Image (cartoon, rainbow, N blue to C red):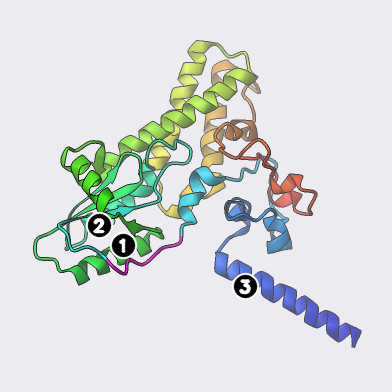
Amino acid sequence: MIKKTRLILFGTIFAVMGTIYAFTGFNCENSCAQLLALGNECPGCQLGEECLNLDSSDFIYVSEPILNFAMSTESTIENMEDKDISFFHVPLVCNAAPTIGCGSRAKPVLKSFESSSNVKEAWLNKSGTVIAIVWKNGIDIDNKKKTVNTIFSEHSLNVSEVNSEEYASNTKSFEANEGWLKGTEVDKLSKEEAAIFAARITKTIEDNTDINSTHLEKIEQKISDGFYDFFINYKSLNDLGNPNSYKSILKNVIDYGNQLVGKDVMPSIATLWESCSNISNTSKSCCDTGKSCSTSCKGTDG
């Protein structure tokens, strides 16, 4: 009877773990990053021993600066104003640079709208909070609703239509072309975001080494170029949330810096990434919580 009870218990545990894995779609390599972004402290404890076999000496988990976009839950627009231009609140602010929109996340959304036979133009405001859809003539309200719901759902965006007061202010701003971008123009935001990352990382390098200003300027440009190239050329949304994408960029920076100033002078990957995090100083990684998941997500707290 005891043996049977144990079998039922273990079966239940594995079924629950399997359900978590099926619904989240997380794999071991980036489960720490993605589950932490959703508020779980310890993904290794949830996903089981398959996540304990990682070579994690310099593993990074990517926190909210990137992953919050991948975690959005799409919404459905039920009631929509039948206007020539529609404005929607969108969660496309860049958390790493919260005064601007995230060009890398916004560009595929804008492209999807631009490829629609119902849409004339699609624009994002510079702050990443509103998308404007300019409709082609003769598109009825049902087709408009179908278009926005389909595209926003495809990109997992939780959106809402602006209210009448906001509509007036957005129309005025849009018609004056005050900080609105369309299509590949949002690459300008990615360039700005990359420069912000570069400045933060370079400051960390400066604080942890004796590298001179001339070399620091070269390293900062290398960092900015690396992030910008990634932001405008990533292949899928999963790449934006994959810790290895950022680990690769930072490894290239460290290699470049060591070539300039000598081997083992540059800080570690973990130290560099910490400067890009907007996790508070009181936040801890799951490796610091005392739980049995240290080998699944060892690395920085950012």
The secondary element bearing badge 3 is classed as helix
Q: Are marks 2 and 3 in contact (CB under 8 Å)?
A: no
Any part of residue 39 in sight: yes
Residue at the extreme bottom of the image, as rendered = 1
Neighbor class of circle 1 (other Cα within 10 Å; few <14, some 14-19, many 20+) is: some
Q: Which residue is mark 2?
A: 113
Front position in the image: 82 or 265: 82
- Closer to the chain start, of discs 3 and 1, is 3
Residue 151 left/right relative to 194: left
Vertical position of residue 21 compared to residue 111: above or below? below
Q: Quadrant of the C terminus?
A: top right
The residue depicted at 75 percent of the width and 49 percent of the height is: 294
Across and down, in percent, residue 291 comes to 78, 53
Name the kind of residue labelled 2 in the image.
Phe
Mark pair 1, 2: CA separation: 7 Å
Front position in the image: 297 or 138: 138
Q: Which residue is mark 3?
A: 19
Any part of residue 258 in sight: no
- Closer to the chain start, of discs 1 and 2, is 2
| Magenta part of the chain | 73-79
Q: Quadrant of the N terminus?
A: bottom right
Q: Are marks 1 and 2 in contact (CB under 8 Å)?
A: yes
Name the kind of residue labelled 1 in the image.
Ile
Residue at the extreme left of the image, as rendered = 137
Vertical position of residue 200 compared to residue 42: above or below? above
Q: Which mark is residue 151?
A: 1
Across and down, in percent, residue 47 comes to 68, 63
